[in-house]
Amino acid sequence: MQTHTFKPDLPPPRMSVGVVGWLKANLFSNWFNSLLTVFALYLIWLIVPPLLQWAIIDANWVGSTRADCTKEGACWVFIQQRFGQFMYGFYPTELRWRVDATLWLAIIGMAPLFVPQMPRKAVYGLAFLAIYPFIAWTLLHGGVFGLDVVSTSRWGGLMLTLVIAAVGITGALPLGILLALGRRSNLPAIKVICVTFIEFWRGVPLITVLFMSSVMLPLFLPEGMHFDKLMRALIGVILFQSAYIAEVVRGGLQAIPKGQYEAAAAMGLGYWRMMGLVILPQALKLVIPGIVNVFIALFKDTSLVIIIGLFDLLNSIKQATTDPAWLGMATEGYVFAALIFWIFCFGMSRYSLHLERKLDTGHKR
Amino acid sequence: MQTTANAPRPRGSLLNDPQVRAWAFQIIAVVAVVALGWFLFQNTQANLEKRGIISGFAFLNNSAGFGIAQHLIDYTESDSYARVFLVGLLNTLLVSFIGIVLASILGFLLGVARLSPNWLISKLATVYIEIFRNIPPLLQILFWYFAVFLALPGPRQSLDVGEVFFLNSRGLYMPAPSPSESFGLFAVVLLATIVGIIALGRWAKKRREATGQIFPLLWTSLALIVVIPGLTALVAGNPLVWSVPELTGFNFRGGWVMIPELMALTLALTIYTAAFIAENVRSGIMAVSHGQTEAARSLGLRPGVTLRLVIIPQALRVIIPPLTSQYLNLAKNSSLAAGIGYPDMVSLFAGTVLNQTGQAIEVIAITMSVYLAISISISLLMNWYNKRIALTER
């Protein structure tokens, strides 16, 4: 009887595995794709080498004045020299430790919130939110405990940007949640008030809101009541963003099945306890990524305070580029600003994506 | 047997009656809003009186007394504030229109590129999107304006394309067309051709439905629209006269000019919004399930036809609502013009006019109501559209 022995398997064709296989599948699968690849390579060659040349290879890194920038490329000396102003604005140099301390306190205080195993996160978070603003205000503004007063007109740079963004989101979040609840309410009068409020702020650009809060707010206030420029901008930002938060939260409320409301009502919970204990915890969990996205938008929008003359990061840089000692540094300045904004926004958008994946505990396909 | 249906409901405390409570809450809310409004109104009146500002819209007829760098309608310094408003509104609409057209083209290209099977192209599109949507639009506007367009060489050293387009620190100069004597005839012929093509299309569709024969409509109409008006132009002479910009002294004369503010604003808004549109397009295309493509292929449709008749109509249903909100965002972001002094409605009206007249309330109210009118009409349009294209299931 004949026995068959199988020959060993042949290796796959060399053209379909390894680097060559990958190249063939992803870059040169047909003539059109090959053409696109060549075009993309040309585009990269057009952009990347000159950019590297300008930003790194030919750049000037050391020096103290404009005259030290002798090479062709970027003059990063300008950023180095003005770094303090970009970060702190006109905050007195010897008091800048107070800003640093505020930031470190925020980082240390918020760190436990990012630890998944932390118990009683909500209680801790609320306590932090209740106490921290007072510490921050005391440190930044001073006036008590022998700290010198630094008026808000001297705040600036990245610090001001962060202050506006942080206060904006903390103010807008509770207001937005209330508005969302109001919009979903069964009471017609409350619903109409909330819908009008939300649609009004969503319909106008932030610039007009800032114009309004800077020129109209003083007219609205009674005799003797005075808000400084920063406060007026903050009020505008909070009202504006709360409308956007409200729409995000409404999306979460609408996603909660009716059974949850009915179950809560059957348990004998009143409206506020039903919302606070059953609906909102689920709804807010759903919309955390959406809220982070609103926060990213808010962070980008803080740059608009330039229009009403506050010196945030962007305005500090814009002012520095008009300094006669550093003329022609606009590109370096704006590229630096773009880099900082980009790092913050990109980081937050990645975090939001991560949250989305982590919180997506429901229907997975 | 006893029924409880008609038994009187036990009445609890009035405080616990849900209907009474609902009324009470609503009345409290309305009273609070009205009281707040009244409080603000009183303060405003007192403040206005103290500052000696007379409220009302009479100031709109006063002469403005300042020049505007770009006006689409005739404008002189002696014109009224109402005219300034109109000039600003048109400038806003101009930026929004150019921006929307360019951002749509770029955004669709990028969205498709991001889904491309070509690894390099999809990564390039991703990098573009991640870079530009994470940089504030105002920063991008300032960058293009101060770091690029104002840093261009002066008129005498302009960069030019074929001695026809000139780019310098004062703007982009391009030839401007004006109608010649034969323009009327040309326009009539062009119109007639278009009407003819539409009729041809109807006929082709009818024939296809009746006999199944396909008429090469695209190529025929392309040929018609090139050949017939082209022949007219050859016979009757060029329908348009081009005025080419020329360097005289220190500046260019003739032609159209796009001021650097307008260029910076449109470019930045286009680049920024395109990144968002690309994401909308991508999610729209991805929302069409793969089964649709497979079903179309198994029916024997070719890839191009599949795309045109199966994928795109379904993707558009997902794409269009967020796309409109991006358009609205672009229109609202055009108010960032105030950062570089492009004469749009906000910087002209809520900026200059407000400073000159001090009529804060009227000016801001007018400006805001224009934006509100735009957004409300767009959202009404959107609701109507959504209803029209919504899937009709069972």
Image (tube, coloured by chain):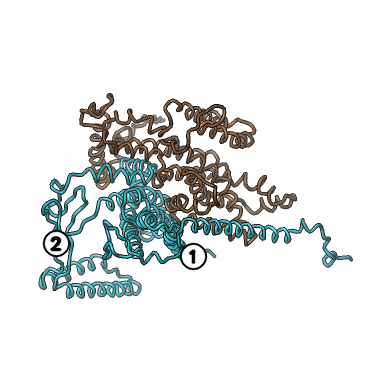
Chain colours: A brown, B cyan
Q: CA distance from mark 2 to mark 1?
A: 48 Å
On the image, the x and y values in percent for residue B4 come to: 85, 64
**Residue B256 sits in which quadrant?**
bottom left
What residue do we see at 41% from left, 30% from top? Answer: A1
**Residue A309 sits in which quadrant?**
top left
On the image, the x and y values in percent for residue A167 come to: 52, 41
Q: Is residue A350 visible?
A: no
The residue carrying mark 1 is B387
On the image, the x and y values in percent for residue B389 come to: 46, 64
What residue do we see at 37% from left, 40% from top? Answer: A315
Indicate the secondary structure of the residue bearing disc 1: helix
The residue carrying mark 2 is B243
Check disc 1: other Cα within 10 Å, few if <14, some if 14-19, many if 20+.
few
What residue do we see at 26% from left, 65% from top? Answer: B74
Q: In what quadrant of the picture does the N terminus of chain B appear?
A: bottom right
What residue do we see at 28% from left, 25% from top? Answer: A64
> Which of B308 and A118 lies nearest the eye of the viewer?
A118
Indicate the secondary structure of the residue bearing disc 2: strand
Residues beneath discs 2 and 1 located on the same chain: yes
> Which of B244 and B349 lies nearest the eye of the viewer?
B349
**Chain of the residue under the numbered disc 2 shown in the image:** B
Residue A115 in the image: above or below residue A36: above
Q: Amino acid at mark 2?
A: Ser
Residue A267 in the image: above or below residue A333: below
> Which of A85 and A357 lies nearest the eye of the viewer?
A85
**Chain of the residue under the numbered disc 1 shown in the image:** B
Going by the image, does A107 lie left or right of A120?
left
Check disc 2: other Cα within 10 Å, few if <14, some if 14-19, many if 20+.
some
- Mark closest to the chain's N terminus, 2 or 1: 2
The outermost residue toward the right is B1
Going by the image, does A288 lie left or right of B102?
right
